[in-house]
Amino acid sequence: MSKPVRPAPRAPKTGPQPVKLARGIGRIPVVKVAPVIEGGAYPAKAVVGEAFPVSARVFREGHDALGATVVLTAPDGRELAYPLTQVWPEGLDIFETWVTPDAPGAWTFRVEGWSDPWGTWLHNARIKVPAAIDLELVRLEGEALLTRTIADLAATDVETAARLAAYAPAFAAPANPAALTTLLDDASFRDLVARHPLRDLVSPTADFPLWVDRERALFSAWYELFPRSQGAFQRDDGSWVSGTFDTAAERLAAVAAMGFDVVYLPPIHPIGTAYRKGKNNTLDAGPDDPGSPWAVGGAAGGHDTIHPDLGDEAAFARFVDRAHALGLEVALDFALQVSPDHPWVAAHPDWFTTRLDGTIAYAENPPKKYQDIYPINFDHDPGGLYRECLRLLEFWVKRGVTIFRVDNPHTKPVEFWAWLMAQMRRRHPEVLFLAEAFTRPEMMHALGKVGFHQSYTYFTWRTEKWELEEYGKELAGDMAAFYRPNFFVNTPDINPLYLQDGNPAGFAIRAILAATMSPSWGVYSGFELFEHAALPGREEYLDSEKYEYRPRDYAAEPNLNKLITLLNGVRREHPALQRLRNIRFLDTGNDRIIAFTKSAGDDHVIVVVSLDAYGPQYGQVHLDLGALGGTDGSIAVTDHLSGHAWTWYADNFVALTPDQPAHILTISD
């Protein structure tokens, strides 16, 4: 990984100078710069301290040598320059390096191609000196380059200038083949001129945008709970008493103890009574059915109001304060839809779609119907809607919410999200957004490009080795510049087929994969208790908490509390698990065993997971020991799941069972 260097001073301009092009191909062509999102319309993503790759194709006419540099400009105007290295195959002219921004905010980067006189001289001299061709010319050209380099460094790096001056005798007249040969074999000399090049014909690209977020945008562990279920109870007559923010706050210590850093709440607003859904999404709600929280709005108010059953603003403030005291950030659902009882329906009928029969269109996803929800129409009064949505976000930000999980963003115009994300980035750059969009890839990608910090993914449905590897490579590759995954193992809407048999080993396998493959992962409460009962033939929960109270005994056995705590602890201890772009899959010789490494500096993690929740699986894990710091043909590893320690080699036999379905190995000293 490259380290930033001080940009070398540019040589004085002599003779006619080419016209500098703001865009297009310059004197030294630089093309196919990455990461550039939609031609630079939107910034590429990074977080503070995260290394990410910058690449470009750099070439020129003829055979003279060239170089390339990427220059990052920080929000405060500082410039960090990194040399790019040509990578194999050289014939494709690919230059690449990894860079690391050190502060949040709006950055830019550009790639500069330049002519490399020292590189050209060294190439020619290696050919001509042994053959005694043009020795005096070789000497003169080298002497001129040395004089220029020393002069450039004299004012800024006296020590390096003096070191270079010590090589002057090799260029003394008359040309001395032996002295020049010794110079060409001197690795220290070659290193000096490589690190302090003369850069002629510098040809910069346009400045491309880069947005650097705080680390939580990339690395997080989410826990989803319904406040109304925490502390809810049933009276003797069968009626229910809702949980409140105060009773829900009692759950926060356990959430924090399991290592989560984000507690996510579904909508906390009043719920409409018109067409209220009953148990299991039925249309015949009874007097004690609380309704779906996503049917936002009622007589008590809309998106800027708290459901009276949960408490008041003071109660919400106590919940937020308790969360913050425990190191938890509060994420709130931002659901841009309303119940028929929402105040907007009367005040702003133009914010909805009126059908030809005069009724307002309710939400549908055939065959599903959501008669209790009206979707928003953004085309009738976009200005009014845009301003109101921005107001709502700022309303909750003032009350301590720092993250929003956005419900169904793919059913709203991408243009709207681009505007809203830009406004929030400018006003509240610390606030993060998670896109809940299970839809077509291009829409999911577009939401990431216009500013969503994290996104739900297809992980929930990826269960085979080949598709997990394919998806992992996709997310860690070019997509990482605009799309950060959050691997939720389940949601109130999704009860995955893989988990519907309730096999504890299956739950453990999915938790281990989610927590190690992705730097962000999430759990909807009940997962740790192996909740799995499904609506027949559907990937949905039977007796879904979306439509009823679900108080739980979180200490009930069996549970995954210990494993989840361990997983979050390992993630916090090891920076390698906090990054996205660093996953490398390993050969195991078995399609039912997946293995990969993640590395960050000297921190290396090896993960081996059986995909079989019912029987033993055996395989051979093949390691690149050199990439893991192994110097003597072996490494000492410790398994965080079992506590066992082993010596591992290039090839390692593994035996995994439902009781011990995985290894999470770190290298021991």
Image: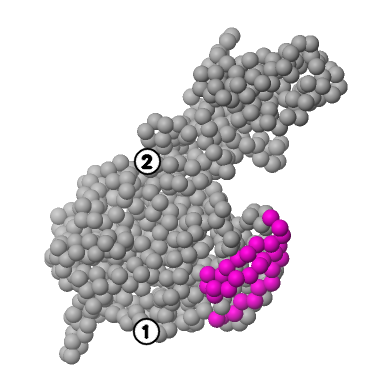
Disc 1 + disc 2, Cβ < 8 Å: no
Residue 652 x, y percent position in the rendering: 69, 68
Task: Give the residue pinned by disc 2.
Answer: 105
Q: Is residue 38 magenta?
A: no
Residue at 36%, 73% in the rendered image: 525
Tell me the quarter of the image containing the C terminus. Answer: bottom right
Q: Does dot 1 land on a helix, a strand or a loop?
A: loop
Calculate the distance from the C-alpha at mark 1 to the C-alpha at mark 2. 45 Å
> Does residue 5 lie above or below 442 as drawn?
above
Q: Amino acid type of disc 1? A: Ala
What residue appears at the point 38 percent right and 49 percent down from the top-left corner?
214
From what the image shows, is residue 47 above or below residue 606? above
Query: Residue at image x 47%, y 47%?
Result: 50
Lateral position of residue 58 relative to residue 486, left or right: right
Give percent across and percent down for residue 160: 59, 25
Q: Which mark is residue 556?
A: 1
Q: Is residue 383 above or below residue 120?
A: below
Q: Is residue 664 visible?
A: yes
Residue farthest to the right, as pictured: 131
Give me the residue at 66% from left, 40% from top. 87
Residue 83 is situated, as x and y percent measured from the top left of the image, at 57, 34
Above or below: residue 188 compared with residue 506: above
State which tag comes first along the sequence, 1 or 2. 2
Range of residues picked out in magenta: 631-659
